[in-house]
Image (cartoon, rainbow, N blue to C red):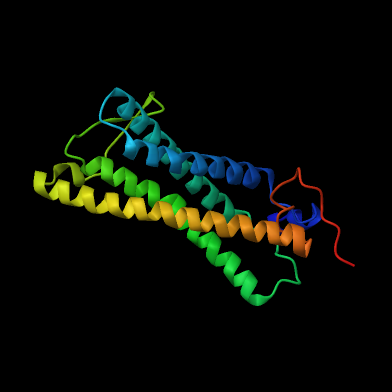
Amino acid sequence: MSATHESRREGGRYSVVSILLHWTIAVLIVTQIPLGWRMGDMEDGLAKFELFQLHKSVGLTILLLSLARLAWRLTHPAPPLPAHMARWEKLFARATHVGFYLVMIGMPLVGWAIVSASPYNIPTLLWDVVPWPHLPVLPDLAPDAKKAVAETLAAVHSKTAWLAIGLLALHVAGALKHHLLDRDTVLWRMLPLVPRPTPRS
């Protein structure tokens, strides 16, 4: 049975794998943004170094899980959106999802590039266990070039955090609108603990 047929047979819910990846990544993103802000406010020292290492581990985990989620999505189509949704709503929903993938994959890649170009050349241990390499080329740049690249990428990284916040706000507002006002299955299909809404009469 195809993934699309299975989704329809199960009432239009996402698969268990999709749901687990979605909520795990969501929790990590919501955790990661305040970590980054906190790190920027701290004075240099051991506490900031440890927080920086945690920030890198969370970011790389988001990257790996997002790549897994993208691969899963490409091989397991999402359940269809409710038929009553207007064309512009469906296009907006798809555009938001594309934006999320760009942020979930692009932002950790930029962070990885910042670390790779850093003149401090601090090694990365994923969750203090797995050695994580730098990206190629960047560590071999001249000191001035490394500094310029790192500063430029840091600015991009910071602004992308605001894009992530905006997408999260839109995503949550849209899901609540569909569940509370439209009373359709948009939120229900991704959150099994939410009861299936009763359609408006």
Quarter of the view holding residue 81? bottom right
* Pick the front one: 124 or 147: 147
Q: Is residue 116 left or right of residue 10?
A: left
| Residue at the spot 39% in from the left edge and 31% down from the top edge | 54
* Pick the front one: 77 or 101: 101
Quarter of the view holding residue 12? bottom right
Tell me residue 32's x, y (percent): 45, 40
| Residue at the spot 56% in from the left edge and 56% down from the top edge | 169
Quadrant containing the N terminus is bottom right
Quadrant containing the C terminus is bottom right
* Pick the front one: 34 or 24: 34
Q: Is residue 59 left or right of residue 81?
A: left
Q: Is residue 77 visible?
A: no
| Residue at the spot 79% in from the left edge and 52% down from the top edge | 10
Tell me residue 79's x, y (percent): 70, 59
| Residue at the spot 27% in from the left edge and 39% down from the top edge | 134
Tell me residue 39's x, y (percent): 35, 36
